[in-house]
Amino acid sequence: MSFPSDGVFASHLVRGLFYGLGFALVETVWTSLFKEREDGGLRFAPDLKGHTTWAMVPGSILGGLYGLEPLYIYGHPSSDFYTDLSFRILLFPVVIWLIEIIWGALLFYGCNGTRAWHYKGKWARMNGFIRLDFFVPWLGLGALMEAVFWLMSQF
């Protein structure tokens, strides 16, 4: 097996690790700030006990490379399929939900009921794989990702 000599494989690998580890960091920070109650509600309770699971990292890598990155590549002004900034930010929660549904289902149904997460409460949907009320935090993260991609494009 030979790899492309122009650095495409290495670039893809670095970006994949950025997504996987980036989302692990985001989830760890989120869970150190907010705790989910039994009824599914959230409470602000900051501590240093944030957590994530390695089972989510491959899903984050694949979702970032094949779900999020196309938003930024094809949504860029130099692309034929340009979309404006607000549309890309609005699509961010949808892409995140798709990643959570697909990866959550693959883990759950393909690994004897293994769950990387299980949302509870009235906003939980799709067998606990997504939470609809996380739309606003996902919008914020989408805006942050736009800023990161813009900064990266400046170098």
Image (spheres, rainbow, N blue to C red):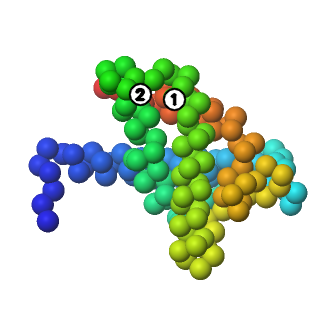
Determine which quarter of the picture holds residue 7.
top left
Above or below residue 77? Residue 11 is: below
Placement of the N terminus among the 4 image quadrants: bottom left
* Label 2: which secondary element: loop
Of 36 and 103, nearer the camera is 103
Amino acid marked by disc 2 = Gly
Mark 2, Cα crowd under 10 Å, few <14 / some 14-19 / many 20+, is some
**Residue 60 placement, left or right of 48:** left
Vertical placement of residue 104 versus 6, above or below: below
Which residue is labeled 2 in the image? 75
Name the residue rendered at 54%, 25% in the picture.
87
Whether tag 1 and tag 2 are in contact, CB under 8 A, the answer is: yes
Asked whether residue 47 is in view, the answer is no
Q: Residue furthest bottom?
A: 112
Residue shown at 27% from the left, 45% from the top? 11
Which residue is denoted by mark 1 in the rendering?
88
At 88% from the left and 57% from the top, the residue drawn is: 39
Find residue 95 and report its horizontal and vertical position in percent: 54, 43
Name the spot of residue 9 as percent of width and height, x first. 23, 51
* 34 with respect to 28 (left or right): right
Which residue is found at the position 37% from the left and 26% from the top? Answer: 81
Residue 138: horizontal and vertical position, in percent?
A: 63, 38
Measure the alpha-carbon separation of dots 1 and 2: 7 Å
Mark yes or no: residue 123 visible: yes
To which quarter of the image does residue 133 belong? top right
Residue 153, image x, y percentages: 35, 26
Residue closest to the eye, 46 or 99: 99
Q: In which quarter of the image is the C terminus?
A: top left
Earlier-in-chain disc, 1 versus 2: 2
